[in-house]
Image (tube, helix red, strand yellow):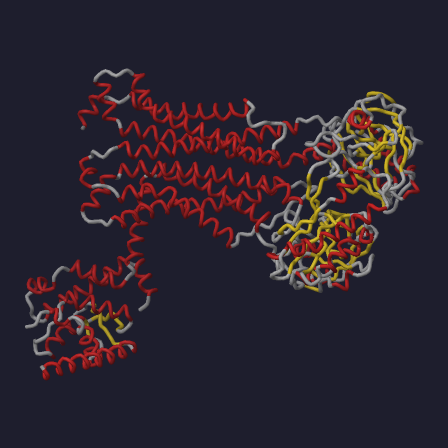
Amino acid sequence: MSIWSRIVNVFRGDSLSRDIDEELESHLAEAVEHGRNPEEARKAFGSALRHREQSRDVRLLTWLDSLRADMIFGWRQLKKRKATSAAAILSMALAIGACTAAFRLIDAMLLRPLPVAGADRMYLVAREGVDPIGSMRISESSEYPLFRRMRAAMKDQGELIAVSYANRVDLTYGSDDQMEKAHRQFVSGWMFNVFGLRPAAGRLFTERDDLTPGTPAYAVLSHEYWTRRFAADPKAIGRTFRSGNDLYEIIGVAPEGFTGTEPGAFIDVFVPTMMNPSVTRSDSSWFRSLAVLKPEVSPEAVRSKLDPLLRAFQEERARGWSSQTKLFISRFLNQRLVLEPAASGASGMQRSYRLSLWVLGVLVVLVLTIACANVANLLTAQASARAREIALRVSIGAGRLRLTQAVLVESSLLGILAALLGGLFAWWAAPFVVSMIASPENPTRLLLPVDWRVMAFGLAAAIAVTFLIGLAPALRASSVRPAAALKGGENPHSRQRLMHVLIAVQVAFCFVVQMAAGLFVATSERLANQSTGFSSDRLLAVETTAKRPQTQAVWDEIGAKLRETPGVEAVASSGWPLLSGNGWNGFIWVDGKATEALSYFLSVSPGWIDAMRIPVIAGRDFRPNEIYPGVAIINQAMVKQCFGGRNPIGLWFEKETGDGVSRDRFQVIGLVQDARYRNMREPIAPTAYVPYRPSDSGTGATRTFLVRSTGSDPLALSSSLRQQVSSTRPELRVSNIRTQLSLIRQHTVRERLLATLAVFFATVAMLLAGVGLYGVLDYSVLQRKREIGIRIAIGASARDIARRVTVDGLWMVLAGGAAGLLLGRIGVRYVESLLYGVKSNEPSILAAPAAVILAVTLVAALPAVVRALRVDPILLLRSE
Amino acid sequence: MPKPDSLQGSLDLLVLKILSRRPGLHGYAIMTAIEEISEDVLRAEEGSLYPALHRMEEAGWIRAEWIVKDTGRRARIYQLTAAGKKQLALEESRWHAVTSAVNRILRMA
């Protein structure tokens, strides 16, 4: 028989004992049958129990058997105290679940290597430099002509891949009314080959599909999109779709599990970089460069090889510039190439959520520690209640190791149950957080598989928790001195010291979590309450596109039709909505001198200022016949930063045209108040609103109509507006309708997410710390009942008793609070970039956690004080 | 009569040998067989026999099964396995080596 049968025997212990007993019985019966005196036979046989034990030990794994016995005993102990066990398991499950969920998010966004060959040797080739606003920034984008040179230069060190930003675009498999959205990405033809990916159907791109600009219009679908959109139908290969003016043919499907190199977005359609019109331009940066190095090649070697290429390329570009400022050119030339490890891919989402996710991770670990401290205290209190039982077990010969094992098994039962429940919680919570980040416009999607990494993390958490909560009670149990314990005179204070330290730790961490919640809530609120400078009330942004540029008359006609739609209060148009993420910027010259600040521009229709309700300070609106360039309406920031605060009406400024040589001239005809254009955080930049370019410039293929409704729900107008556009001009269609409010809210998603989660964890931490404090105080009253009874009997006052019962705990709360304050002040330095308009030493930020902890302490201490005062000395002393 | 201890180490050999000659014996029968064949010189204590049987069963040298006897009582009978036969050969040769060595010493000394 094998180890297996010995394992099996552990779990059929009872029937094993029965078997052995029966065999021994039959032995005796046989002896009697053969004429032996039963009495004498039994005596000769010796102790049946001992034989059974010996045989049992031979036939099963003793350590496993003792483990099983401890499990059963531990389980009984847990069941005996249902309420406390459930509370312990639930609180730890919540904490472990939160930790696991945070790990899943961090893993999926930042850590997990892409499922491609050489992911560990993949680097993002970016450049580091001072941006036009003046801050140090990593820019990930590159120009294709430079990319070509770099790729050739590092040929023997590795492969360079161009991957554009995932873009949600309109495409159609049928007529234009059946437009749908899909994530499209331009990729180098050799990407699939370098990544070692095999097609799930059809074929993938090769280098030959990516040689000539403008051809071939092939597309590869992602497996996920193929399954979702075509139900994995092989006939999808060969179908065509139209996107923009290009008709693409589907040639294959990428393998399952590969969703692109941009964590946070699933790519639906891959197309060759050659299909991007910017592929020949030196002034357009529109993709990331990913380098997959050969083994043994150091990134520094590649960097030093490529850096001169960047410098040469930039110098070539700057050579023709005559009108740029010296500062701008020196910043432009002083960019430095960097190679960032990108095993898990590269995305803007990673950059903007990296710190937030780690902050989240730290918060949940703090909450987990608080929960563990709670349960450790609980178990310690219980261990002291069981001191006599343990002492008895020691005195009848139980090994100390065995006792330690018994206690650890009990805590591991708690840990395992909590981890299982926590796993369920994490299974739900991680996708939930992702859905909070996502918006209909920007559907964030993360691959969140429950794989060995997540499992290993869950297991590690369970083991860590087991030791955190079980080690102290286990060591205590194993060091029990039977004589002292059975006399009932063990020193109760030694135990309380540990419990009090744990309380201080809890309070400190609780303070940190409360403080973080306060900071993030304040940030979120202050950002949300930022004035935008315009009214988003009942305002819709109706993005309209045409297949080819339209004359201004057509757009005016559409505007007029929309204005006639019932329920519409005002209509105007602009190139794109404010705060939509789009931007157009450049430098301007006033009095022949270039200005330091980067200015922003937006094409708007007459009446736009009025429709947006941006207050006019001076001057007038555009007239219908005015075109770009020539006139501009500017904001206060431009007056301040570019015109030195003068009255700008009637003054002129110049703007570079984009070729770096010539300039356009504008006369300021209006001055309006500042309105937010790019985001909610940065100071409002100088902004000029300008008329549309003339129709023949080829830029009039899209307009965004701003529609203010009379009814309170502007989205109710959606279908009638769509109808109105397509019935007026069939060649136009509405590609997107969003409320201006949702555009604004999308700028504070991260802050709202952090605030919501931090408040949630702060609440949990507060409850746990409260319960923990209550438990310890209550327990210390129980421990000191005799002492309290005697004190009451000899006439101690109620105040004296209350003070004696609570003073130790209160000191611990104070010490913990002070430690928490210190920790919080240190920690806040690392999250400064996540905060907005709030300082860590603001009184409200410090007072709130202090008040919360004080309130919790009072509530938690009350029952213990009441219990102490209710001690009846007569009853107590009689029972002793 | 020698103390049971003197059987130490050779109990396995005796049990295996007996089972190889007479397969299907139960514990009591093995015990009496040892006594009978050794003409009451050797005696296996119950306290050593059963743990030894279970240990050898665990080691895979013997195989046990329950049978119902005429009396209606169940008995656990043992048989040698292939591994047991090998083990028996091993133990026998070892025994012969030891006894011949001891004999040599007795003769020489």
Residue A70, position in %: x, y? 30, 50
The residue depicted at 25 percent of the width and 63 percent of the height is A58
Relative height, residue A257 to residue A626 (above, below): below
Q: Which of the 4 image quadrants contains residue A395?
A: top left
Q: Nearer the viewer, residue B15 or A16?
A: B15
Image height check: is A305 above or below A850? below
Can you see residue A236? yes
Residue A657 picture quarter: top right
Q: Percent x, y for residue A722?
A: 80, 39
Is residue A193 shown left or right of residue A499? right
Quadrant position of the N terminus of chain A in the picture: bottom left
Task: Name the residue nearer the viewer: A233 or A470.
Answer: A470
A377 sits to left or right of A394: right
Q: Quadrant of the C terminus of chain A?
A: top left
Viewer-closest of A826 and A733: A826
Q: Is residue A662 left or right of residue A15?
A: right
Residue A173: x and y in percent read 77, 54
Residue A569 visible? The answer is: no
| Closer to us: A677 or A406 | A677
Q: Residue at x 15, y 65 (%)?
A: B47
Count of numbered badges drawn on the protein: 0
Residue A167: x %, y % from top left: 73, 47
User: Residue A643's image quarter?
Assistant: top right
